[in-house]
């Protein structure tokens, strides 16, 4: 599966708005590039997550940010070797949309989760199909 490297997040506050800027490289192998030539599509998913407790690796997608970043398709081309596609995406939302800690003066810890979605690849297993039942006596 494609990989992601050099992911960064920058939050810039101006008055009551915050600009969320996410940058990263998506790296597609030669195999994935051939699959793209056969019709496979790859697009990004970026979720804005509130982190609690601070420093934790997990968190909850902030409800006011769901769907904030559209699922942008990568322009993967057929070829040998890796293809690196640099992404730099930004959205501006209200500061209140990023409020994940309710106590006054409690800072909000934010991170983004980036995933690459491959569309068109057959599932690992087919759907289950069962034979008719038979009864074995004794």
Image (spheres, grey):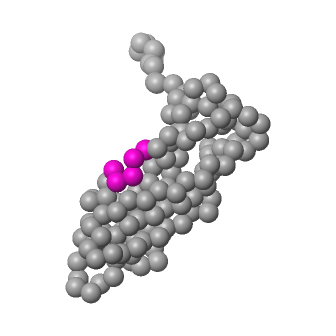
Instruction: Classify the position of the N terminus by image quarter.
Output: top right
Return the x and y of residue 72 as percentages of the image width and height: 46, 44
Q: Is residue 104 magenta?
A: no
Return the x and y of residue 10 as percentages of the image width and height: 47, 70
State left or right for residue 75 relative to residue 99. Answer: right
Residue 25, by quadrant, is bottom right
Q: Is residue 32 above or below residue 53?
A: above
State left or right for residue 108 relative to residue 26. Answer: left
Q: Residue at x 66, y 44 (%)?
A: 28
Q: Is residue 120 above or below residue 59?
A: above
Q: Is residue 123 above or below residue 86?
A: above
Residue 23, by quadrant, is bottom right
State left or right for residue 37 relative to residue 56. Answer: right
Residue 123 appears anywhere in the view: no
Q: Residue at x 77, y 41 (%)?
A: 81
Q: Is residue 92 above or below residue 45?
A: below
Q: Residue at x 39, y 52 (%)?
A: 69
- Considering every residue shown, the one lying at the far front of the view is 14
Residue 53 appears anywhere in the view: yes
Return the x and y of residue 95 as percentages of the image width and height: 28, 71
Provide the residue span drawn in magenta.
67-71
């Amino acid at each position: 599966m494609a990989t992601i490297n050099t992911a960064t997040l920058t939050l810039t506050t101006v008055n009551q708005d915050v600009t969320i800027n996410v940058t990263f490289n998506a790296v597609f192998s030669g195999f994935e590039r051939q699959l793209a030539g056969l019709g496979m599509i790859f697009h990004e998913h970026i979720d804005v997550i509130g982190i609690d407790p601070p420093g934790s690796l997990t968190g909850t997608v902030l409800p006011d940010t769901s769907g904030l970043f559209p699922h942008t398709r990568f322009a993967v081309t057929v070829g040998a070797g890796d293809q690196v596609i640099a992404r730099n995406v930004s959205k501006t939302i209200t500061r209140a949309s990023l409020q994940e800690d309710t106590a006054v003066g409690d800072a909000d810890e934010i991170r983004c989760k980036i995933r690459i979605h491959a569309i068109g690849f057959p599932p690992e297993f087919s759907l289950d199909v069962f034979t008719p039942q038979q009864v074995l006596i004794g």
